[in-house]
Amino acid sequence: MRTGRVFAYCLTLAMLLSPFSVQAADWPQWGGRDCRNLVSAERGLPADFVPGTKLPSGAGIDPATTKNVRWTARLGSATYGNPTVADGRVFVGTDDLLLAANPRFQRTRAGLVQCFDEATGRLLWQLVVPRRNNLPPESHFGHQHLGVLSSPTVDGKRAYVVTSAGDIVCLDVNGQADGNDGPFVDEGQYMAGAGNKPVELTDADADILWRFDPIDELSVVVHDAASCAALIHGDLVYVGTSNGVDGPHAKVVSPKAPSLIVLDKNTGRLVATDDGRIGPKLFHAQWAAPSLAEVNGKTLVFLGGGDGICYALEAISQAADQPVVLKTVWSYDCNPPEYRLRNGKPIPYYEGDKRKSYSTNKNDGLYLGPSQIIATPVFHKGRVYVTIGQDPAHGRGKGLLHCIDATQTGDITKTGCIWTYDGLDRSMSTVAVDDGLLYVPDIAGRLHCLDADTGRCHYVFETKAETWGGTLLADGKVYLATKKDFFILAAGKEPKVLGRIYLGAPAYSTPIAANGVLYIASQRYLWAVQQKP
């Protein structure tokens, strides 16, 4: 009995001291929750790790050379989306480089969605997305080779993804292992690509439950690449369309096409669209993901517009027999007059693209002109926080971060402004807000720490490397991936670097944390990082 009591005491003590005794949670969608705030309650996350060295065979990372790494997985050659974790599985989008030597597929430099076992990193199944051809003559859908940019959104036994071909698919999280569930049963042809012989399905292939194609159904003309993370609310899926301009950047090809659509999550049927005000005013493309929160008893969907305006739309509770139009509750112009006008005349958007021969942008961060919204609006304590920016290929320029009162209605550009911060460059990054502090990087790679209530800057930390993703705030640490290094800083009003790690390839995504594990995706590898006892 004494031995049993001692053993029980030691076991209990070990559980209490273990970092995994804290309540852990999945990260089932971009931002973890509907508000999209990049904050995790995970504890026991590492302040350093060693990513390891590549195996001579090229098959992956040698685990013997790693530290604080649970497992690694080989991705493609381009990974721009962010992983999600749910129900024992890890989902991530990448490109199809891994299929180069696979005789089952006609590799055409397109997309791949991979599903890994959360415990071991074993590949469970994958969805191959061939390159889309036969596009309208004015379409400039030229960056499909970047792969699947969407963070899969997991809801129960289904995962929702915007593919590199611009369509939206609902996937069975079990893949083909539990059979080919309908109503969509043509996965073999879908993954082979039009005009090719269908592939013979195996348990390692994805199971598409339904598919909706905004390009064919709604005349959407995707510009460059399709990029959005789906948002689930009740039985509905909210997703942006990536509608945009033509190849010469001269006009919006399909101005009447919707920028935001709502689908029945069970069937893929079109339920609603936005009111069409964004389409004619698009600067470049509609790439921002929506967020959601309850404000004054109403559920609002927040959307960063490709026209540089942040919108709040009233969410619908159920699907009607015919598609309806979403009601706009408020709008807020994130480009103040000095960003839109020069000497009383509109500033041409593409004058700010450093690549244009007529551009006056010297790529020094000082160029002042209009920007769109690529970042996801974050809701926190009655406020919406959002940055403005442009495609990174356009170069640097003056950015702006807004703190918006989400409780108002109408055009709240003047009345809804709580504060703005102009000390940053253009930014694609979504903010993280917690404990009175806000963290956001800009495209130039400077991490800004602000007072969330007032916008007062506490510090600016120079990473000296281009940065696309946002910061993850977890366990008293700030995690940030850049084009050159991965940084770990202590959370707080002073910049304190805990770790600086070279991943061996650029990282354009945002790290996430789930169930005691930190996930980091570079262009080529996914690391599951865990503090070893």
Image (cartoon, rainbow, N blue to C red):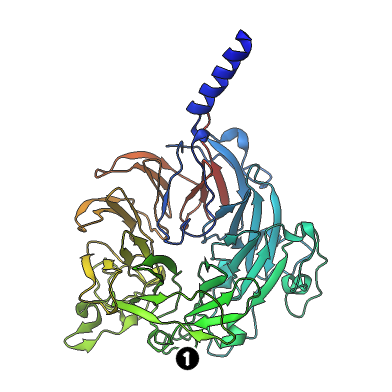
Apparent side of residue 115 relative to residue 314 in the rendered image (left or right): right
Residue 401 location, quadrant: bottom left
Figure disc tally: 1
Q: Residue furthest front?
A: 297
User: Residue at left 52%, top 59%?
Assistant: 29
Apparent side of residue 504 relative to residue 109 in the rendered image (left or right): left
Front position in the image: 81 or 162: 162
User: Residue at left 35%, top 42%?
Assistant: 489
Apparent side of residue 300 relative to residue 397 in the rendered image (left or right): right
Residue 430 location, quadrant: bottom left
Q: Does 473 appear above or below 161?
A: above
Front position in the image: 286 or 211: 211
Residue 304 location, quadrant: bottom left
SS class of the residue under badge 1?
loop
- Count neighbours of disc 1 (C-alpha within 10 A) and say few if under 14, some if 14 to 19, many if 20 or more: some
Front position in the image: 223 or 360: 223
User: Residue at left 70%, top 69%?
Assistant: 209
- Residue 443 visible in the current orientation: no
Q: Which residue is mark 1?
A: 256
Rendering coords of residue 251 (x, y %): 42, 90
Q: Residue furthest top?
A: 2
> In the rendered view of the protein, which quadrant contains the N terminus?
top right
- Residue 59 visible in the current orientation: yes
Rendering coords of residue 497 (x, y %): 33, 40
Amino acid type of disc 1? Answer: Lys
Rendering coords of residue 284 (x, y %): 41, 80
Rendering coords of residue 420 (x, y %): 22, 66
